[in-house]
């Protein structure tokens, strides 16, 4: 079975490693485990929170695990998760006048970048991540791994397009900020708006003009001759700046 | 031939792709090309700057290129570079009282992270990157690729250890800043010193205590319950902050 069938059509996803598995059992998680596959030596440590009459736990040596799954198993901890219904994007935005920091991803098809952005969203306390239709699924194995599990904890939802994300921002009183090397304003000079939607596009073509035209265009000041940052890195720098006031004193 | 023999013992390295190849020919580069291997359709575009009587340029179809090199060739542009002698680390530090921003990497063995940090160092105009003996070689193919070529342009040198980096900082009047989740000061509250050595360690064990004890320990403010950033991302946020004054108005 290909991962895109598992994740896309079956509503399931694969969780690797103990830290990520524990996140599935952390309170209030949107997702739950359907079954768990462990190397026998991992059972004693994990048994306390896996004892649930409805949760099958299978034990198998790592060779068998690798043969079953088709990829090399290093840590001896795997689970199948059930994704459930996606929430509506409107439901994830904190109601005004509360502060809000929402990340919007447009056309990001690289699992490393999407996973990294979830990790950064968690680190800086973003309220939600909204994805356009082109952006890849954060519940792919690689994206979950690169996210350090944040893909399971940071709420996310889909909107049809980048312009639908702008509509959403307008509906909820979020200031749309388009991060782009061609931005007129610098991030450094920006007074962070209390309610913001930070929009990121792909490293090559960037955000569509239809999105940027309805947003404030912000750039990160860089050294002359090398205006190139990875999109997840650029997003981290912008989230750090936008969250600074919230996080001050923590 | 294994890459570690080519890079480590032979003083050569592999460059992929046109953008990176062009960097090898940009003025003042420390490195030069020894030979170039191109798919025939790439020759016309690259000929203007490859015409040099001493530089052999071989043309071969992509299938032949892949067979020769042992990895799939997508872009049809490869070169062998010559690294030459490493500079002394002292030679790379701008003399006082000029401003200085130097990145020090301790124990970073992941080519993605080292490549990403070179990219970030270039983006924020760091003067040099200094590596301890454990940190992996920035001239590995993957590191060069992830660096977007910055491994070829940002000056770097080796020091034997993290404490040798601190000695160097003291010798040159650089303020050593150790980035660590346990730092007493936050990056946000820090008044960026005009001459700084930013020290980064691995994500798990972090910087050795022997290094941190002689540095100012700085942390990035993060949301409670998730103090986890990728080391290249954390480095980008700190470089961005330390370079802010230099880059203001660009």
Image: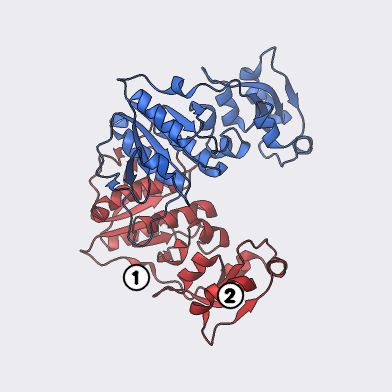
Chain colours: A blue, B red
Residue at 69% across / 13% down in the picture?
Answer: A54
- In this rendering, the answer to whether A212 lies above or below A223 is above
For the point 72% across and 19% down, the residue is A56
Which disc number belongs to residue B11? none
Q: Which residue is rendered at x = 33% and y = 43% of the image?
A: A217
Is B187 rendered above or below residue B3? above
Q: Residue furthest bottom?
A: B53
Q: Position of residue B71 (x, y in %)?
A: 68, 62
Q: Left or right: B133 with respect to B164? A: right
Q: Are marks 1 and 2 on the same chain?
A: yes
Q: Residue at x 56, y 75 (%)?
A: B44
Q: Position of residue A105 (x, y in %)?
A: 47, 37
The residue sitting at the top extreme is: A53
Tag 1 subunit: B
Q: Quadrant of residue A178?
A: top left
> Circle 2 marks a residue in which chain?
B
Q: Mark 2 sits on what residue? A: B43
Mark 1, residue position: B91
Could you tell me if residue B214 is visible in this image?
A: no
The picture quadrant where one finds residue B119 is bottom left
Given the current orientation, which residue lies at the most extreme left position?
B97
Q: Position of residue B89 (x, y in %)?
A: 38, 67
Say which element carries label 2: helix
Residue B178, can we see it? yes
Horizontally, residue B85 falls left or right of residue A95, namely: right
Disc 1 is placed on an element classified as: helix
């Amino acid at each position: 079975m290909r991962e895109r069938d598992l994740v896309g059509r079956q509503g399931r996803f694969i969780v690797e490693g103990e830290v990520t598995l524990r996140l599935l059992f952390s309170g209030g998680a949107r997702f739950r485990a359907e079954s768990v596959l462990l190397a026998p030596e991992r059972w004693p440590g994990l048994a306390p929170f896996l004892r649930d009459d409805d949760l099958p736990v299978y034990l198998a040596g790592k060779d068998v695990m690798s043969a079953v799954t088709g990829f090399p198993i290093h840590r001896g901890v795997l689970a199948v998760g059930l994704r459930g219904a996606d929430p509506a994007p409107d439901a994830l935005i904190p109601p005004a006048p509360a502060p809000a920091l929402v990340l919007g991803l447009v056309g990001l098809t690289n699992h490393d970048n999407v996973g990294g952005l979830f990790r950064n969203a968690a680190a800086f306390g973003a309220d939600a991540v909204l994805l356009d239709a082109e952006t890849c699924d954060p519940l792919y194995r690689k994206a979950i791994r690169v996210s350090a599990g944040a893909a399971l904890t940071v709420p996310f939802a889909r909107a049809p397009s980048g312009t639908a994300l702008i509509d959403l921002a307008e509906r909820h009183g979020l200031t749309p900020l388009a991060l782009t090397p061609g931005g007129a304003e610098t991030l450094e000079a920006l007074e962070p708006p209390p309610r913001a939607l930070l929009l990121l596009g792909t490293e090559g073509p960037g955000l569509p003009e239809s999105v940027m035209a309805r947003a404030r265009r912000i750039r990160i000041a860089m050294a002359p001759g090398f205006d190139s940052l990875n999109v997840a890195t650029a997003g981290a720098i912008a989230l750090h700046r936008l969250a600074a006031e919230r996080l001050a004193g923590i």
